[in-house]
Amino acid sequence: MKSKSIFFLLLCFYLQATEILITPIPQHLAYNKEKANIGKMLFFDSALSRDKSISCSSCHKPSHAYSDKLDKSIGIFGQKDIVQTPTILNSTFNFKQFWDGKADNLKQQVNITLHNKIEMGMNKRSIVEAVDKNIFYKNSFYKIYNTHKITYEMIVDSLAEFQKSLITPNSKFDRYLKNRTKLTKKEQNGYRLFKKLGCITCHNGINIGGNSFQKIGIIFKYKNCSNDRYGITHNEIDRCVYKIPTLRNIALTSPYFHNASAKTLEKAIETMSYYNLGYRLDKDSVIDIKSFLETLTGKIPNIGTK
Amino acid sequence: MNKTIKKTLPLILIGITIIVLLINFNSNRKIYFSNSNRIQSQLDKVAHAELKLNYTVLKSTIFLFNNNDDIIKSIKNLHGTVIDLTKNIYFKEEYPDLYKKFTQRYKKLVENKIEAIYEFNTINSGIKNSNTFLINSISTISSMRARYDVEIPHKYLKRVLSTISNILMSKNSMNNFIKSENIKLIEETKINNKKLNEFNIIMIAHLEMINKNFPKYQKLLNSITDIESQKIISSINDKFFTLNLKRVNKMNYIFYSIIFFIIFYTALIIYLFLKLDKENCRLNRSIREDYLTKLYNRNKFEEVINQYNNPILFLVNINKFRHINEYYGTEIGDKVLINVANILKELTQKEDPILFRLGADDFGILIKSISQVDKNDYATMLIEWFENNEINIKDLKFRIGIQIGISKEKPYFEKADMALIEAKESIREKYIIYRPHHNKQDLIKTNIEKTKVLYNAIKKDKIVPFFQPIVDIQTKKIVKYEVLARVVHKNSDIETIFPYLQIAKDNKLYFDITKAMLAKSADLFFKKNINFNINFSIEDIKDKRVLDILDEIEKKYPGIFNKITFEILESEAINDYKSIEEFISTVKSKGAKIAIDDFGSGYSNFEHLLNLQIDYLKIDGSLIKNIDKDENSKRIVKLISNFAKESNIEVVAEFIENESIHKVLKKLNIEFGQGYYFSKPLSSIS
């Protein structure tokens, strides 16, 4: 009797432990709407780039789930970027930003991107000047800060605030987690494999990733490791180490990996399971996993509404 | 008012200081406690956050599946608590050593730890997955034989199982049992079967992955769970507690000091209050007590007098006390008063009266009930004591006389005072008990009337001289006149000046009367060339202005002094014979003559008279009036006459009212006479 109850207790613990591996995206997240609205305008404003050719949205295309279908996005003066553009959807849930995790938060991310020589190529002064020219921004900032003097920090803040608003709740999987819907057999099997093979060891949490640094090719050496975390830490152990990307909306954000080497989701699944888990998956398993991953596509925020 | 403010200002300032100190102390105390509580709670939060982080990390090693968000959350939490405490300015400023230790050592350790956790997470994922793979591979190998019909070399199998077992041991015990040479041997094993070879390649990758990363895994986990950072936070906590305790103690000292200060202040106020109270008492007493004799004063008398149903008041006055003050000074005078007060206290001890000092030299003895004493015996007892005893003050011996006014009815003081005044005036009575007829109300009224009349008369020159002839007793011829002052009333009634003399004396009008008399009679008698007598009182003699008038008259009427006889009234009041002598010698040198008026009325002092160069004696009327019937009077007059003749003094008899008197006087060889028998005072001289 006693041993039975202990068994149930352990079972419950185990179940609980597995079920909270992935948590659903909340319906709403607290953020400053006024700031986010300015941020939204700025996000689409090419005045923020040095040659006025691109805006944030040029690479983080709303139509492509705020990522880029190009292997390498095009920066200012037609320059090619060095890594594949990650989506900024749900980026507020990431523990670090960028592939190499060089930013601790969204504000740092905005700051780095604005200063990046390939990307926006601006500096604090040129940014403020560009924004200061626009009467709309002036009025909007005045409403929030009650001053006519626009500062760089205000601009960064509003862009970060806009990114906070970009969350994708109500994915099928989230609804499944909340017992609002059921997964198909394939999806169910995909999820089972996802756990059993060990994908979930790294892809877990609210963003199903984005909460640790991991090494690509931990089992079989991966050769094409450019712009990895070693560039930041210069620690040998950080060779081929990247921030684990989120798997939310993964079906919408091809191509995959930092180097865009996987053009399709199937390829990405196969690559990851071989290099990092030591499995060569059969077709069915790949399809099942893919169908599970497709349930992670949530509601993309509508740009038109405020 | 100003003085009061000056006196109370320090007290108010001290009071304000205490209040300010208290408020300041209290707000400091509040700030201190809220700040130190905040530090304490932030320290606790940091320590707790670190423990929580350690827990989540360890949890991630135990469970195969783990939500890394937990670790990130814990890291952010720890980071946040550390930042909070770093931003605590109070901690930075008040505990600089601890702050330095926290920001430099602890913060660095935490940062290292977080980095280590990130690295650990990377390795942990791989190790967990490989671990899972290896566990699964045990069954895979065994099933492979059946599935693919592969002969698995025994040695190979043994090595694989041994290596996997070592890896599991290592992971569970956190000790490295993995033998690299075993893995190498597995790698070197030749496998012909394709499937097995495929499996083997993957397995070896996993084995090598673990083998390669396990030391790092072990090291990172050890560094993450290292307790050094916890030791530091714990030591910061301990040190903070000690410092805090010291500060609390210091604050207690300040608090005790303030309490002491308050106690001191309270004591000061109590002291000042008592002092004020004492002062108040003293003032209170001085309202009711005479400062000199310590007897009660008039105020107290008025307070207590109505408390007794049937009291009796003895008002004791020191006879001629003013002279003591004048001759010996007030210092002695005060001593006399004190002495008398003490003597009265002793004398009246038995009856237990209340003693007062009711005037400069007036003492009140209030016997509470009239039945306690026989008033006559009591007064006599007091008077006799002073008659029989001397008072010694600074080697001086004083024999003091007292008079007493006694009253047993309301208003006690006023009536006793009236009785006392009467006793002072009386020659024989040393004490007088108030009786209704002593009520001077009427007298006062008439006095006021008389004063008015006299003022008016002087103002309107209605004091006129009347003239009574003085005749030679033998020949009945008029030899001269005595000038007598008369007051002419508004209705032309004429009244003698005598009823007004005392008033004139009291109101300092005597001089005006004398001046009028002198001027008018001098003019008249100079013109008529007749001699005349004029009355001069002791007041006139002492008045220097009178001498000036006399000089003026002499200038105006040369030789007038030869016609004047100054009649000086011999009375008790004459105690200053020196000024009389001076006056007499002055006027006599100018040719005037001197008569002593009312001689034989009781005050005569033969010894002094002999020293004065007098020319006439006017025998008092009381001796003449009955001289024809009273042998005694006749004998006295004869004696005076004889004495006068011996001394070359001529005698004048007054009040000669009939012939038989005249005959007696003629027989006695009296030189001159005056009276109604010869003539009444006349308004003019024919």
Image: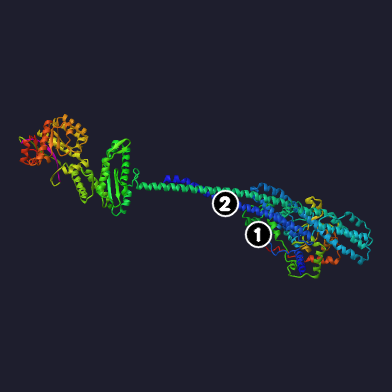
Instruction: Report the coloring of the rendering.
Output: rainbow
Subunit bearing disc 2: B
Measuring from the top left, give residue B518's x and y in whole percent. 16, 36
Tell whether B532 sits left or right of A83.
left
Quick check: can you spot residue A122? no
- Furthest-top residue in this view: B589
Tell whether B475 sits left or right of B434.
left
Q: Which residue has dot 2 on it?
A: B27
Marks 2 and 1, how far apart in space?
41 Å
**Snapshot quadrant of residue B525:** top left
Badges 2 and 1, same chain: no
Q: Residue at 59% across / 52% down in the picture? A: B30
Which residue is more in the foreground, B106 or B613?
B613
Mark 2, other Cα within 10 Å: few <14 / some 14–19 / many ≥20: few
Measuring from the top left, give residue A23's x and y in whole percent. 74, 64
Q: Main secondary structure of the magenta part?
A: strand
Choose mark 2 or mark 1, whichever is in front. 2
- Residue type for callout 1: Glu
| Vertical arrangement, residue B533 with respect to residue B67, above or below | above
Q: Residue at 81% across / 66% down in the picture? A: A192
Subunit bearing disc 1: A
- Position of the C terminus of chain B, as image quadrant, is top left
Q: Which residue has dot 1 on it?
A: A34
Mark 1, other Cα within 10 Å: few <14 / some 14–19 / many ≥20: some
| Vertical arrangement, residue B152 with respect to residue B30, above or below | below
**Range of the magenta residues?**
B476-489
Which residue is more in the foreground, A233 or B648?
B648
Q: Report the label total.
A: 2
Measuring from the top left, give residue B162's x and y in whole percent. 88, 59
Tell whether B530 sits left or right of B288.
left
- Residue type for callout 2: Ser
| Residue B477 is covered by the magenta coloring | yes
